[in-house]
Image: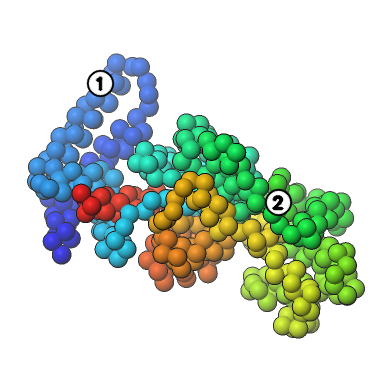
Amino acid sequence: MERYDRLYRLYSDHDTDTLRALQNLVDLFPLVESPVALDRWQEINEELAAGKAGIDDDFSEVGETFADLATRATQEQAFTGLDLYNKYGRSVNVLILDVDETLRSTGSTDNEIPRDTLNMLTEFHDDGIPIIICTGQTLESVKGFAIQGLGSELIHSGNLSIVYETGIGVFTPGHGARTKQLLYEDLDEDVQAVFEDIRGRILSEAPENLRRGCHLQGNEFNITMKPNFDTASTAAKDVIDEALVYELDLLGDAISGLGQVDLESETVSEWTRAYYAEQDPEIRSVLESEGALPDRDATDVSSDLEDILERLDIGYYEGDAAEIGSLELSKVVGVEAALDVLDIEDPFSIVMGDSKSDLRVMRWAGENDAGIAAAPEHASQSVLEYVEATDELVFDQGRAGEILRMVYALNRFAESADS
């Protein structure tokens, strides 16, 4: 309890709000050559240093740690960090981060990663903590915003990896022949044939309203239909629901074309719908609303068809995307490949995300004592249930930086305990 008592005294006896404000000014102060601006920047630094020195003097052997905490974490974040350290007894040594609706949000951050979040990521990088960006986006899309937000130096530092298209590939600049790994090249030939078949005709054979209302995302391997309307709008929801049904039928037809299932193409498509409806309540709900749920019991699907379906993944994101992927190429597989390249043998991560693909990484981390999980308040229900049942690290929309500050506090406590 002594550490909790001292931590409480830190925030009650010292003006930590001012210290955090000063630190934010130092971090975000624009680089200008104006003498007036530079003089003010120097004044801010001096005031910050004086405040930290007062804390250092007040808390003797933990003074440096507490002074650092005061400039980065609120009282709540610091106490949460201490709770987590006492629970797990170690520091976070890798960040595993989803992007869309996690680091950035169309609802509150204008689809840009907030400066506060970017600054904290830079702090972790400066501390030598590797960063794994884990996303469903294409590689080029991720590289573009990452370089713009984090800077080319950080991206090419050798300590950052990008798991893209939900795990079909891993890009880790600065690692020679291992810089780019195309994980999909290791898939079974039949699975690759299904993707090649669908990709070659998904738009050309689509009904006119889907051709007008959707576009095919520029994926390297996964097949993703996106709406030509504002994400989450009524029009986007309607066209993506229809696209989901279309993709399921096209998948069934492609599987039938392999010649390994002794059923008519239309029948295979019906079983395909039934199979994925059984796997995912959201898909079932869409099929029901579209009048496309077949009267078939998914438990009766033939073994030869199930053998193929259980290797494939259907991703449904309401009003945003309908996607065909491979369950053999999940974010978990991509993360494991990234950890290998980054040479992290004993990971303890913070996994942040909002979707079912992120939930798989969270569960992997939990089952392997490899980290803790956090999610935004608008995450899918299954993600929220998992996060709330573990450490309750749920953050407001667009406020991922708050979790990063909590992790920063956790790491400071771990460092002080080891010293």
Q: Which of 16/1 is in front?
A: 1
Judge the density around disc 1: few (<14), some (14-19), many (≥20) Cα neighbours within 10 Å: few
Q: Quadrant of residue 46?
A: top left
Q: Residue at x 61, y 54 (%)?
A: 166
Q: Earlier in the sequence, mark 2 or mark 1?
A: 1
Task: Please give left or right for residue 214 compared with residue 31 in the image.
Answer: right
Q: Judge whether 217 appears above or below 291 on screen.
A: above
Task: Please give left or right for residue 45 compared with residue 168 in the image.
Answer: left
Task: Please give left or right for residue 82 compared with residue 105 in the image.
Answer: left
Q: What is the distance, in whole Å, between disc 2 and disc 1 at their CAs?
A: 57 Å
Q: Which of 18/324 is in front?
A: 324
Count the labels in the image. Answer: 2
Q: Judge whether 199 appears above or below 355 on screen.
A: above
The type of residue carrying mark 1 is: Asp
Q: Residue at x 32, y 49 (%)?
A: 408
Q: Judge whether 364 appears above or below 214 on screen.
A: below
Give the residue number, with chain letter if any, for mark 2. 185
Q: Position of residue 176 (x, y in %)?
A: 57, 36
Give the residue number, with chain letter if any, for mark 1. 39
In the rendered view of the protein, which quadrant contains the N terminus?
Answer: bottom left
Q: Position of residue 417 (x, y in %)?
A: 21, 54
Q: Residue at x 74, y 59 (%)?
A: 188
